[in-house]
Image (tube, rainbow, N blue to C red):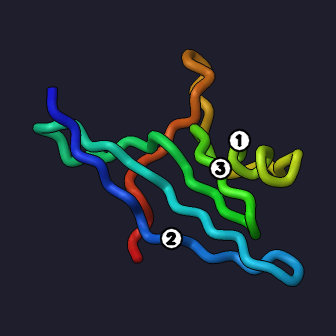
Amino acid sequence: MRRNFTAASCRIIPVEQSLLYVRPLYVEAEGTRVPELRKVLVVHGENVVMRDSLKEGLAAIFGDAPETQEAVPADTGEAAAGPPPPV
């Protein structure tokens, strides 16, 4: 099965006197138009991480992370995400 890689728009978020860059990365299986969140790239200052969810990325950068709006299915324990929001 072939998959296509899609990078959503970069989100730039002011944090105190700096900027936080967040870019979700999706894959889309051939034959379906529903993208699946695979990784999240998080950049703050000199720190760059790629993790499976926004919460994990924030925790890697800041040592802890606030609650996010990522849904966690009860059966897998993995973050679920739909298509990126419209830009």
- Please tell me in which quadrant of the rendered image residue 2 appears: top left
- Of the pair 68 and 29, the residue shown nearer to us: 29
Q: Which mark is residue 56?
A: 1
Q: Which element carries disc 1, helix, strand or loop?
A: helix
Q: Are marks 3 and 1 in contact (CB under 8 Å)?
A: no
The residue most toward the top is 75
16 horizontally vs 43: left or right: right
Query: Which mark lies nearer to you, 2 or 3?
Result: 3
Mark 2 is on which residue type? Cys
On screen, residue 77 above or below 52: above
The residue most toward the left is 31
Between the residue at mark 2 and the residue at mark 3, the CA separation in whole angstroms equals: 14 Å
On screen, residue 8 above or below 30: below
Mark 1 is on which residue type? Glu
Read off the residue under disc 3.
Answer: 49
Q: Which element carries disc 3, helix, strand or loop?
A: strand
Mark 3 is on which residue type? Val
Measured as percent of width and height from the top left, residue 29 is found at 22, 37
Dot placed on the residue nearer the N-terminal end, 3 or 1: 3
Q: Residue at x 80, y 45 (%)?
A: 59
Measured as percent of width and height from the top left, residue 25 is found at 43, 51
Read off the residue under disc 2.
Answer: 10
7 horizontally vs 63: left or right: left
Between the residue at mark 3 and the residue at mark 1, the CA separation in whole angstroms equals: 9 Å
Dot placed on the residue nearer the N-terminal end, 2 or 3: 2
Q: Are marks 2 and 3 in contact (CB under 8 Å)?
A: no
Q: Residue at x 57, y 38 (%)?
A: 52
Q: Are marks 2 and 1 in contact (CB under 8 Å)?
A: no
Task: Assess disc 3: are there few (<14), some (14-19) or many (≥20) residues with their C-alpha within 10 Å of its C-alpha.
Answer: some
Dot placed on the residue nearer the N-terminal end, 2 or 1: 2
Measured as percent of width and height from the top left, residue 20 is found at 71, 70
